[in-house]
Every structure is written in structure tokens, then in C-alpha cells.
Image: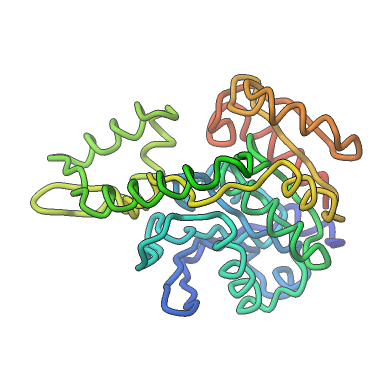
Amino acid sequence: MIQSDNLKTMPRHCTECTFKVANLTFAAKRWQPQQATATDSAPKILALHGWLDNCASFDFIAPQLNADVVCVDLAGHGRSSPRNHLGAYNIWLDVPELLEIADQLGWGEFSILGHSRGAAVGFILAGTVPQRVQQIVCLDGIFPLINTGQSAPEQLLSSINAVKKQRARAPSIYAHFEQAVKARQQSAFPVTYEAAVAFAQWGVEPNEGGFSWRYDPKLHAPSELKLTRGQVEAFASNITAPMHVLLANDGLITAHEESMALLSQFNTWTVKYFAGSHHFHMAQASESIVNYINELY
């Protein structure tokens, strides 16, 4: 993925686009150079956001990346279709959907930029079709949640019950747009006001005289099954692309002993630490992360 030097200074523009995949519609933002010839030669990056976020997760870095960046609302998130079934949102279901989107873009090979859950999805994708992935950048996330095989029956029952409960759940209605913003700002994974506004401008819609967030409530249900450590290691060992794991000093991964222990097994991967919490790419670390990614191409 070699780019010309003038791509670094070329202005970019954002377009909203959609992709039809099976019976679902996927919404996305695409940041690319204004000149078509530059877009053709630019690195291709598929950007995958985290759990209950949307593609605005990359609004603070995508405009500065020297690449053609497609930021997708994953199924059930933001403006993309929910999955109309009785199952949970298992991360391996995202893989064929994303590959179809890459095919529609005409991208035989591409890089992955993933945050949190999106990093785990990208990890599984890269381990499944290593020949198609050129670079992987994980932002405060990497491995899927791990469980033991012995707990599979309990896990499945928990998921079934949670999906049933979430399907009956009514969305939270906020009287004013700013109340929806504040709710996101103060959620389980707090973000800055600016980040909450970015999420809300894309992911909040009018609803019953007020406003509500767009996402499938089934996303709150746990997966029917989780991969075992051996399965996660198998995906990791199958990845051939350079792996760059960028962690927030006060994020989720550095405080998760099992993830850090597993990460230490793969000494060819690059691990870097940046200031901030889980959404560091939308806050004080955004410029440093942009500089790091641009140096890869």
C-alpha cells in the first residue's frame, strides 16, 4: 500500500453511503481524497466502531488519515439495520457482512481500524481471511471475550433469556436532544461532550415527541457462545498482517489481566500506549493516533 507524497496534503471529503447485504442495509461514512485518482491509489481502511457506538467514533481521526476510510455502522448500530432474529449479536456474524461490503467497494485487500468490539471483529476477520488484510490497528480492544467450553450450556440459556427480555424493551425517550447527549456522555463508558455530540448527531432520532438512540436493544444480550482461549489463539496465529495494538493508559485492556497475558504471547505484534480512557481516539490521543497510523503508509 504505497501512496504518493501529495496524498498527505490533499483535502478530503466525507460522503454518506449505504450497502445492501442480504436483507440488511448498512450505513457508513466514507472519508477520501477529493481527487478520484488519489482515492484509487490511497490505502483502503475499513473502520469498525465499538459496542453501542456508531461510525461517528472515527470523526476525530478519519478526516486526517492519509487513506480512503470507510466507517461502517455495524449491524444493529446507528443507522444500519437490526438483525431480525431471536439471536444475539455474535461477533462472527459481522465477518461475512463486512467482507461483502469490501467486495462491493471493490477492495480485494484492505486494512482494518477497529475500536473495542470493532477491534475484536477485525481480529476474527483477519484470522479468517488473512490474505485479504494488509494492516490491523486495534484501539483499546483486540480479543473477543473468552469462556470455557464447560460453561456453554449456561451461556446459551443466559443469552436466550436476555434476548427475550431485550426484545420487549421500549427505547428510552429524552425530551430534548441535549438530554440524549448527556446520557451518552455519562454512560458506562463516559466520553467527552464533543464525542457524545458526534455520536448523537449520527445516532439519535426523533421518537414519540422526544428523541431516542438508534440501536437494537438485543445488543445488550450476551452471545450464545463465546470462544475458548484455544480458539482465540488459533485465530491469532492465523493472522499474517502486521498487528498494531494501541492501548489507552486508563482504558479497558490494561486493566484486564487475561487480555494482557494473552497479548504477551504474540511478541511480533506492536503494542503502544497512549494517554486517555477507552475512547481515547475521540479525545486527547486523537492527534497522536493519527500520526501513528499515517506513519504506517
| Above or below, 218 relative to 15 | above
Q: Is residue 139 visible?
A: yes
Q: Is residue 14 left or right of residue 164?
A: right
Q: Quadrant of residue 241?
A: bottom right
Q: Can residue 191 be seen here?
A: no
Q: Position of residue 120 (x, y in %)?
A: 63, 47
Q: Position of residue 103 (x, y in %)?
A: 65, 77
Near-viewer residue (244 or 168): 168
Quadrant of the snapshot with the N terminus: bottom right
Q: Position of residue 205 (x, y in %)?
A: 24, 54
Residue at left offset 83%, top offset 61%: 3
- Describe residue 17's horizontal placement relative to residue 5 as left or right: left
User: Relative to 17, does residue 69 appear above or below in the rendering?
Assistant: above
Counting labels gives: 0
Q: Is residue 134 above or below residue 273?
A: below
Residue 229 position, x and y percent, is 72, 41
Judge from the rendering whether residue 3 lies leftward or rightward of residue 258; answer left or right.
Answer: right
- Of the pair 104 and 122, the residue shown nearer to us: 122
Task: Name the residue at the right extreme.
Answer: 268
At 65% from the left edge and 20% from the top edge, which residue is drawn?
249
Q: Nearer the viewer, residue 136 or 169?
A: 169
Q: Which residue extends farthest left? A: 209
- The residue shown at (32%, 50%) is 217
**Point 76% across, 62% down: residue:** 43
